[in-house]
Amino acid sequence: MFLKEIFCILVTSLYNVPAVQGGDWGVHYPPQEMCALRGSSVVIPCTYDYPESFKGTVLTVVTVKWFGITDRDRYVYDSTGINVSPEYENRTEYLGNKVKNCTLQIRDLQSTDAGRYYFRFETNQPDGKWTGASGVSLSVIVHEEPKVTLDPPVPDHTVKEGSFVSLTCGFDRCTLSESSFVWYREGQPISNEKSNKLQFNVSYEHSGKYCCAAAEKSRIKSEEINLIVKYSPKNTSASVRAPGGIAEGSSVTLTCTSNANPPVSSYTWFRRDGNGDEEKAHQQHLNFSSITSSNSGDYYCEAKNSLGAQNSSSVHLSVTDSPKNTSASVRAPGGIVEGSSVTLTCTSNANPPVSSYTWFRRDGNGDEEKARQQHLNFSSITSSNSGDYYCEAQNSLGAQNSSSVHLSVTGRITNEGMKTILAIVAASIAFGILMLGIIVFIKRRNKPSIEESFNNAESQDRTDNISNIVGDSNLQGPAGEDDIQYAAIHFQPKSPERNKHQEEEEDASVIYSTVAKPANKT
């Protein structure tokens, strides 16, 4: 009886072909055979058309039906709720409507569900009925294993980062429904991927082995396909290995790691510097066999292959050390005089930082501790604070002393003291001037005038003339005379008013006396 009904429906549909040719009536199925695994679900996509009116009646769809011709002919779905075969009850769901959509879902497929399926709709006009005569073929796969193919096909399934690829899961006989797949990468399900095609723009994270199954609970999975992605260095990082800690003199190793395909061909180490990055080594490991504080700083590495390069983040090397370059300095804006403010400051380089500073003053009996702080302050220094001072800087790794600085405190000059000094200076200047005047007076007193010098010279000339005359007289007298008589000659002093002419006249009137030696008595 059921077979006859189906036959009549198909024949009626053939008679209505002219209406389909007019483009008003029709049912549209997938163009190719559909496949699904036993136990899975299948969605059969479907649409239909009908005219707005037919034989003077505005059409509305009243009933929709799906039926199949399999090993047993049966109704799969009926919107009236009657005539549905018992084996399809609770396994089918109409996903369409009574307008244009006629999509059907069948769950928990059995091998007996394989066959051809048809859709039929009936309107409010008795002659307005239509069945899609072509139908859609469904195959149910029981034990066949699916297969993954790569599009576009490339040798060794090797693709370059950034390219577009498509993985397709299917069977040799047909293509499965899109809603019946689950994809796996490295054995783990890829969430939200239910299509038979897995498509993406390739990144380095897409490298791995892929497979698919026709149902989430299916134990039958495809053979894995290994997708190989070539990419430039990724996740480049720098790490520090210092078994004994980063202390001065210890061994420290920096290591650069990166993911790349092809593998990294070169590593380069740099140290960041205020004037530019300083290249340190062309190798994966940067070794410090005996590290020093001068090696402290920020380091990073560059990984490179034929497709590109990437830098790591920086790692900071902070080399621990006892205090170094400890020094003491003096700050005395007003000079080191009594009553002024003087500050001694201790500085040192250390890692960890200096934890304590101690100030000492050297003493003949031993060094005297003055303060436990970085700054030694004298708010009003006195002469008793004079001396040699040094400081000690200390951290957890050791200590170091600075060289000494000498404080020599001079006395402050008060107003009274300044007056005394000024008075002494003034008295000294006055005494000096007085002594200079006395010396000049004495020298002037003892020095003859020019006129006196001239008179003395003239007197000497006259005396010489007389001596000459006397001498001549002695030559005229007989030799051996005993008695000699002398003549006294008086010279008149020159008056200041006399001139040279007067002197010449007087010279002409000079009377010379002849001294005669008496004759010897017989």
Image (spheres, rainbow, N blue to C red):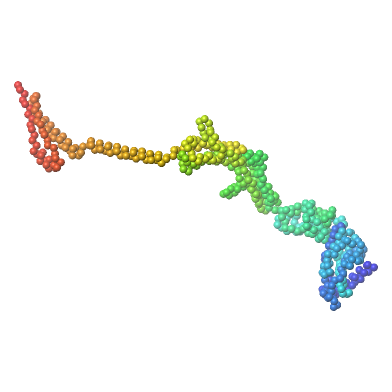
Q: Position of residue 314 (x, y in %)?
A: 64, 48
Quadrant of the frame with the N terminus: bottom right
Q: Left or right of 250: which side holds 428?
A: left
Q: Pick out the residue farthest to the front.
A: 416
Q: Left or right of 228: which side holds 412?
A: left
Residue 192 found in image quarter? bottom right
Q: Left or right of 31: which side holds 347?
A: left
432 in relation to 34, above or below: above
Q: Left or right of 210: which side holds 129?
A: right
Of residue 362 and residue 430, the one placed in the foreground of this image is 430
Of residue 405 and residue 25, the one placed in the foreground of this image is 405
Residue 433 found in image quarter? top left
Looking at the image, can residue 29 be seen?
no
Q: Position of residue 329 (x, y in %)?
A: 51, 40
Q: Position of residue 492 (x, y in %)?
A: 12, 37
Q: Position of residue 153 (x, y in %)?
A: 76, 58
- Residue beneath the point at 87% across and 58% down: 108
Of residue 73 and residue 420, the one placed in the foreground of this image is 420
